[in-house]
Image (cartoon, rainbow, N blue to C red):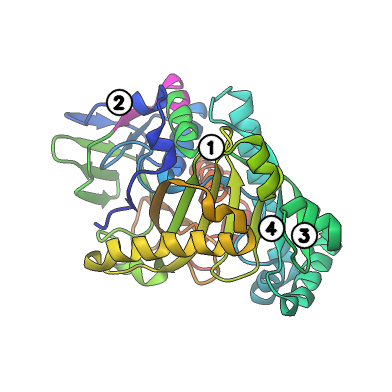
Amino acid sequence: MPRLRVDTPLWLGRHSAARRARFPALTRQLDVDVAVVGGGITGAALAWRFADAGVRVALVEAARIGRGSTAASTALLMQEPDIDLAELVKRYGTTRAHRMWQLSIDATHDFVATLTRMRIKCDLVRRDSIYYAQEQTDVSRLRDEHRRRAAAGFSGRWLQGDRLRRAIGFCAPAAIRTTGNAQADPFKACIGLIRAAERAGARIFERSPVHAIRSSSRGVLLTTPRGSIRADRAVVATGYATPYFKMLRARFKMFNTYVVATRPLTRSERRRIGPGAVMLWDTERPYHYARWTPDHRLILGGGDRPAVPRGQRQRAFVEGTRGVQAEFVRVYPRLEDIAIDCRWEGLFATTPDGLPYIGPHRRYPRQLFALGYGGNGMTFGFLAARLLVEWYLGKRSPDHDLFAFSR
C-alpha cells in the first residue's frame, strides 16, 4: 500500500496528550456486531456512533490511529462540497443536488456540535469561508453559483471591491462568504472521538493490518497477523479502495496534495500580510486554500496533482510545496520573507463527481464502505458515520441512495 503522507504534518509535531496516545494490537479472537477497518477520522466517528447506539464494535487500524490521511488534513470543516452546486444540479437534477448540499451542511453543523458537546480539545474554531475568483473571467460563473445557492436557501454573501479586499488582504474580482464553517486540529479531533468511542464500549486496536475479510451467510471474519474478528458486518473506512478491493479501484482517482505552514507570525506581521480570521479557497481547479492556526501560523495548501509513482514522490513533494508557497507569495508578497516551519504532502482519493461512496456494494456481501471523500474528508467522514449506522440499524431513507455506488 502507498504511504498516506510524506513528512510530518504540523499536528504531529506538536507536544500534546493526543500525540502520546497508544492502543494495543489485536492479539486474540473477538466476537462483535460490527468491525470497522481504518483508524482515521471516519473510523473514529463510526466507532463512536456504533458504540453510542449500543452496538458491539471493534476498530482495527493497520498503522497508528489518526496518523495517516487524517493527520495530513488541514481540517477545514466545510459545508460546501468540492463540486459547485451548479455542477451537482447538472449531474443529478435540482432536488437531489439540493439534498446532497443540505446533508453536507448538516454534517458540518453536527460535527461541530458533537466536538463541542463532548468537550473534545481540538482547537475547534468557527470560521467563515471565502470562496474567491482568481480571474475576472471566473466572476460570471461564481455569480451564477451564488444565485443558485441563494435560490435554494443556502447562506452566502456576495463580496466585491473594498469589502472583499479587507477580508482577504488582496484584490480579487469577487467572492462568496459563507458562515457556519469551522476549523480544527484533525489529529486531536480523531483521538478525542476514539477516546469517546472507548468510553462507550468500543474496542480499539492499532498496528493490526487486516489481511483478509471473508464473508458468509452468518457474518464476516477479519484476520490480522496475530488475531481475528468475527462480526455481523465489516465497515471499510480506509479512505480509498485498498489493493484488497481490486474491483472498486477503477472508481477512484488518487491525488497528492501539498501543504506548508509558516512560523508563528507576530501581530504586526499578521496585519501587514493581510488575511483576516477567515478560511480561504479559490475557484481554480485544483484549488488553493489558506487558514490560520491558534498560534498564528498561516497554513497554505493545494496544488493537487494525480498521484505520482513512489520513485518520483519525493521530488514531486519538493516541487508541490514550493508551488503552493509561490502561489500565495504571488497574492501576499510579504510572505516571501516569512520562514516555512513545516511542509507535508497527503494522498487522497476522489470520485468522478467529487462525492463519497457510502453504503454496501453487491460484490462484497456483509461489508459497508465509506470511501473517496476528495478534499472534504472531515465533513463527509462524519456524514458517512451517521448514514452507515442508520443503515445498519435498519433506518434507511432516500438519503442513503444519494451516496450509493449505484447513484
**Closer to the eye: label 3 or 2:** 3
Q: Earlier in the sequence, mark 1 or mark 4?
A: 4
Residue 59 spot, x, y in % from top left: 34, 35
Which residue is at a point 39% across and 29% down the rendered structure image? 56
Which residue is identified by label 4? 101
Query: CA gap, disc 3 to disc 4?
Result: 16 Å
Q: Earlier in the sequence, mark 1 or mark 2?
A: 2
Residue 353 spot, x, y in % from top left: 55, 70
Q: Quadrant of residue 258?
A: bottom left
Query: CA gap, disc 1 to disc 4?
Result: 35 Å
Disc 1 to disc 2: CB gap under 8 Å: no
Mark 4 lies on a secondary structure that is helix
Mark 3 lies on a secondary structure that is strand
Amino acid type at circle 2 is Arg
Q: Nearer the viewer, residue 233 or 313?
A: 313
**Closer to the eye: label 1 or 4:** 1
Disc 2 to disc 4: CB gap under 8 Å: no
Q: Does residue 316 show up?
A: yes
Which residue is identified by label 1? 264
The residue range painted magenta reads: 196-205
Which residue is at a point 20% across and 50% down the rendered structure image? 212
Which residue is at a point 23% across and 50% down the rendered structure image? 214
- If the image is split into quadrants, where does the N terminus sit? bottom left
Query: CA gap, disc 1 to disc 2?
Result: 29 Å
Amino acid type at circle 4 is Trp
Residue 59 lies, with reference to residue 201, above or below; the image says: below
Disc 1 to disc 3: CB gap under 8 Å: no
Query: CA gap, disc 3 to disc 2?
Result: 42 Å
Q: Nearer the viewer, residue 38 or 290?
A: 290
